[in-house]
Image (cartoon, rainbow, N blue to C red):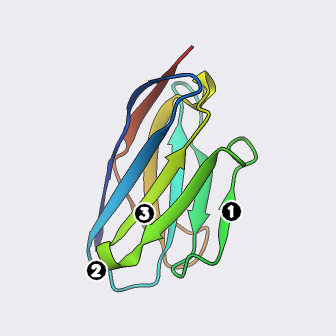
């Protein structure tokens, strides 16, 4: 089992930045793809970004490309999401997830709320 705990959410003005963290504990020896998803009020959960264990492979949703950057620190079992140029439509609960096989999530965190005011 892997436990994931997100942090770093909060209230920010449009155009501002936030850095989310996701700390993993438990069975962290696996070479997981790490992912960020988000769910806005009244909407379906959507993929934001993912990163391979080595960090050499990353992908982003078109809506965040060029503004968000995913990274990871395997020594400290942590994955990050740097979010710049935030927009009100980025308001959502952001969750991280771990996948043994890419695009098939095995473990989820509970999420952290990001609110972007206009």
Q: Quadrant of the C terminus?
A: top right
Name the residue nearer the viewer: 111 or 51.
51
Q: Secondary structure at mark 3?
A: strand
Q: Earlier in the sequence, mark 1 or mark 2?
A: 2
User: Distance between the Cα atoms at labels 3 and 2?
Assistant: 15 Å
Q: Residue furthest right?
A: 62
Give the crowd class for mark 2: few <14, some 14-19, many >=20 residues within 10 Å. Answer: few
CA–CA distance between discs 1 and 3? 14 Å
For the point 59% across and 54% down, the residue is 69
Determine which residue is flagged by label 1: 59
Residue 106 in the image, given as x and y percentages of width and height: 44, 69
- For label 1, the SS is strand
Q: Is residue 94 above or below residue 70?
A: above
- Of labels 1 and 3, earlier in sequence is 1
The label on residue 113 is none
Q: Which residue is mark 3?
A: 79
Rate crowding at label 3 as few (under 14), some (14 to 19) or many (20 or more) other CA atoms within 10 Å: many
**Residue drawn at point x = 36 percent, y = 57 percent:** 22
**Residue tagged 2:** 27
Mark 3 and mark 2 residues within 8 Å of each other at the beta carbon: no
Q: Quadrant of residue 11?
A: top left
């Amino acid at each position: 089992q892997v436990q994931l705990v997100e942090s770093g959410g909060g209230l920010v003005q449009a155009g501002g930045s936030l850095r989310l963290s996701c700390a993993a504990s438990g069975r962290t020896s696996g070479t997981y793809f790490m992912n960020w998803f988000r769910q806005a009020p009244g909407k379906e959960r959507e993929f934001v970004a993912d990163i391979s264990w080595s960090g050499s492979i990353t992908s982003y949703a078109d809506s965040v490309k060029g503004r968000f950057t995913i990274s990871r620190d395997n020594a400290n079992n942590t994955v990050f999401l740097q979010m710049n140029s935030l927009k009100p439509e980025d308001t959502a609960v952001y969750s991280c997830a771990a996948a043994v096989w890419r695009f098939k999530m095995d473990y989820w965190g509970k999420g952290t709320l990001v609110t972007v005011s206009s």
